[in-house]
Image (cartoon, rainbow, N blue to C red):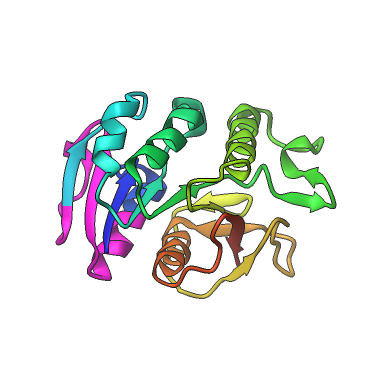
Amino acid sequence: MKIAVVGASGNAGSRIVAELARRGHAITAIARHPENIAKLPHVTAVAGDVHDQPSMTRLLSGHDAAISSVHFLDSDPAKLVAAARDSKVGRYLVVGGAGSLEVAPGVRLVTTPGFPVQYKAEAEKGAAFLDLLSAEKQVNWTFLSPSALFIAGERTGKFRLGTDQLLTGPDGKSWISFEDFAVALADEIEHPAHIRQRFTVGY
């Protein structure tokens, strides 16, 4: 497939590009500084500004799927969704956050007393992005939330999927590597199972 990845030089974005490239997809890797994108087979690095909606629309046009892997505070969700809609891209997938996941019915992680203050603004904007997508009728969106701890690690291919609830292991730890997150996202693109839905991945 032809897949555009916005934020392709970031922690999650770079792993997503690598995972899709190893599967043989044709990737348009979009970043503010395309020189920071790793040179890989099937990958074309392109400069792009997430705040320039007309430019984003042009860059996403003609792709089977587009992935947004940018910090919520560094972007305007309304512009990104509009670009996805106007480009008529087949699918629009968002690298979400864990803050919008529920720890009890109707209780989002970001609203709990122990949520780290330094991540609160980013998590709240991520939750608002999900709410915006939930009201979207024209875009075939999917929002993939990582577990609470989202870090560099190994590509094991062994993980669990969930829906709106935070996943935790037997030890109480909630985590996923960037590498396995990329596997879960690539699997979703190849085998659609969460159209117009949020889901989550964790160990």
Q: Position of residue 123 (x, y in %)?
A: 62, 35
Residue at 60% over, 56% down: 197
Asked if residue 136 is among those painted magenta in the image, a careful observer would answer: no
Residue 49 in view (yes/no): no
Q: In the image, is 166 to the left or to the right of 151? A: right
Q: In the image, is 96 to the left or to the right of 83? A: right
Quadrant that contains the N terminus: bottom left
Quadrant that contains the C terminus: bottom right
Residue numbers of the magenta segment: 16-43
Residue 75 in view (yes/no): yes
Residue situated in front as seen by the camera: 88 or 112: 88
Looking at the image, is 22 positioned above or below residue 135? below
Asked if residue 17 is among those painted magenta in the image, a careful observer would answer: yes
| Residue sitting at the far front | 138
| Residue sitting at the far right | 105
Residue at 74% over, 70% down: 170
Residue at 60% over, 63% down: 202
Which quadrant of the view contains residue 130? top right
Residue at 58% over, 31% down: 122
Q: Position of residue 88 (x, y in %)?
A: 35, 46
Residue situated in front as seen by the camera: 202 or 92: 92
Looking at the image, is 148 positioned above or below residue 2? above
Q: Position of residue 110 (x, y in %)?
A: 72, 38
Residue situated in front as seen by the camera: 203 or 83: 83
Q: Position of residue 153 (x, y in %)?
A: 44, 60
